[in-house]
């Protein structure tokens, strides 16, 4: 973004978690003054899972990533992403431990996030999607099968078509009132790219999101994933991704879908194909018949275009093909 171009005062809210939200937020802050990230709260794996199990706290991992993405303090940002690699703290990031300590001290995860935002000099705000202590479940009642926990859902090849499954939070969770208020007063609501079931659906199935997304005057934009996920979204085209988002919400609330209408080099596609992941196809005729506007563009980042989250052991694979957040931000401004 040109240093001479003023930032937009549009109120922008993003929904998601993980690498997709981190990458997008890291660049959106250069374009928009009023930025809010609503973050998934069902992670139960890795450092986050261990802290939840041992200390009974809410999951800090995705929240930490979004805080870091919006931070204006490089050294503190690096500190929050620092991951211990030895001793009893091996596998834990400093930011996860910091948020956990604050929650234990104050008794409030929301207050912990506010304090961390001050320490990190966050531009904008990060809001947990729910403040309830929940577990993500994916169930096929007809087959009497239930996958319990985000970690299990994330790593396993799903046994049946996920479009026939019920995604839910246990116990049933209420959306964070602050998250609902942010959406109600937004100009743009951006559903970030990310795992459909563990990053996006985990937010959208909480009670309250359907009603506010149906009534907000904001334009709701979904940024479609670039590649499928093995065992989860095999064969899903752009329209199928958007359809699942609206199934989670329970209403046709999407106004615009961004999708990539180019294609990366064959050598990159081959690397993904070896892992069972493939380029998300576009059926233009299908998209023409949807209630939303489908906007194609070149949204693929080159190797050095987009910041990555340090300490992400899967980053090398995840970021062969990733969104050019700068191109996405410019397209959002056009809206």
Image (tube, rainbow, N blue to C red):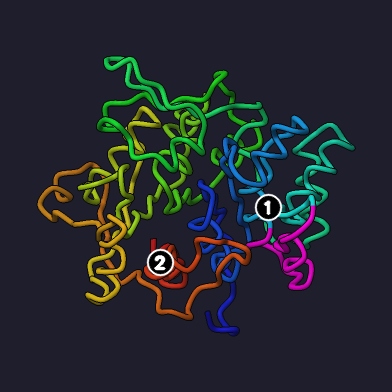
Q: Which residue is mark 1?
A: 64
Secondary element type, mark 1: helix
Which residue is painted at 62% across and 67% down in the image?
310
Task: Please state which of residues 212 and 114 is positioned toward the viewer in this rendering.
Answer: 114
Question: In the figure, residue 200 lies in which quadrant?
Answer: top left
Question: In the figure, residue 112 lies in which quadrant?
Answer: top right
Residue 35: x percent and y percent?
A: 61, 56
Horizontally, residue 283 falls left or right of residue 233, namely: left
- Res. 54 mark: none
Q: Which residue is mark 2?
A: 322
Q: Is residue 49 above or below residue 148?
A: below
Q: CA distance from mark 1 to mark 2?
A: 21 Å
Mark 1 vs 2: CB contact within 8 A: no
Residue 242 belongs to magenta span:
no
Horizontally, residue 202 falls left or right of residue 297, namely: right
Question: In the figure, residue 309 lies in which quadrant?
Answer: bottom right
Residue 124: x percent and y percent?
A: 67, 56
Residue stretch rendered in magenta on the structure: 68-87
Which residue is painted at 54% across and 46% down in the image?
186
Q: Residues within 10 Å of mark 1 (few under 14, many from 20)?
A: many
């Amino acid at each position: 973004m040109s240093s001479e171009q003023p930032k937009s005062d549009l109120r922008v809210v993003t929904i998601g978690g993980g690498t997709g939200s981190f990458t997008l937020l890291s660049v959106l802050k250069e374009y928009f003054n009023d930025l809010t990230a609503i973050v998934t709260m069902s992670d139960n794996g890795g450092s986050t899972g261990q802290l939840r199990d041992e200390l009974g706290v809410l999951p800090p991992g995705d929240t930490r990533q979004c805080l870091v993405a919006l931070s204006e303090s490089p050294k503190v940002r690096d500190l929050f992403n620092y991951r211990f690699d030895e001793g009893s703290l091996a596998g834990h990031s400093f930011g996860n431990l910091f948020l956990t300590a604050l929650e234990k001290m104050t008794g409030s995860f929301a207050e912990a996030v506010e304090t961390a935002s001050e320490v990190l000099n966050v531009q904008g705000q990060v809001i947990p999607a729910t403040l309830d202590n929940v577990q993500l479940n994916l169930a096929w009642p007809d087959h009497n099968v239930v996958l319990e926990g985000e970690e299990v859902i994330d790593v396993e090849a799903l046994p049946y078509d996920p479009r026939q499954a019920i995604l839910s939070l246990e116990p049933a969770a209420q959306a964070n009132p602050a998250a609902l208020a942010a959406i109600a007063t937004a100009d743009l609501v951006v559903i970030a790219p990310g795992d459909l079931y563990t990053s996006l659906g985990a937010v959208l199935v909480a009670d309250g999101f359907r009603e506010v997304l149906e009534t907000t005057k904001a334009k709701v934009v979904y940024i479609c994933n670039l590649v499928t996920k093995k065992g989860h979204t095999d064969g899903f085209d752009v329209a199928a991704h958007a359809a699942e988002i609206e199934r989670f919400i329970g209403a046709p609330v999407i106004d615009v879908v961004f999708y990539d209408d180019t294609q990366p080099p064959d050598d990159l596609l081959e690397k993904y194909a070896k892992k069972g992941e493939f380029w998300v196809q576009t059926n233009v005729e299908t998209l023409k018949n949807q209630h939303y506007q489908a906007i194609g563009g070149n949204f693929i980042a080159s190797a050095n275009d987009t910041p990555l989250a340090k300490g992400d052991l899967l980053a090398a694979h995840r970021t062969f093909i990733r969104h050019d957040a700068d191109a996405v931000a410019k397209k959002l401004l056009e809206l």
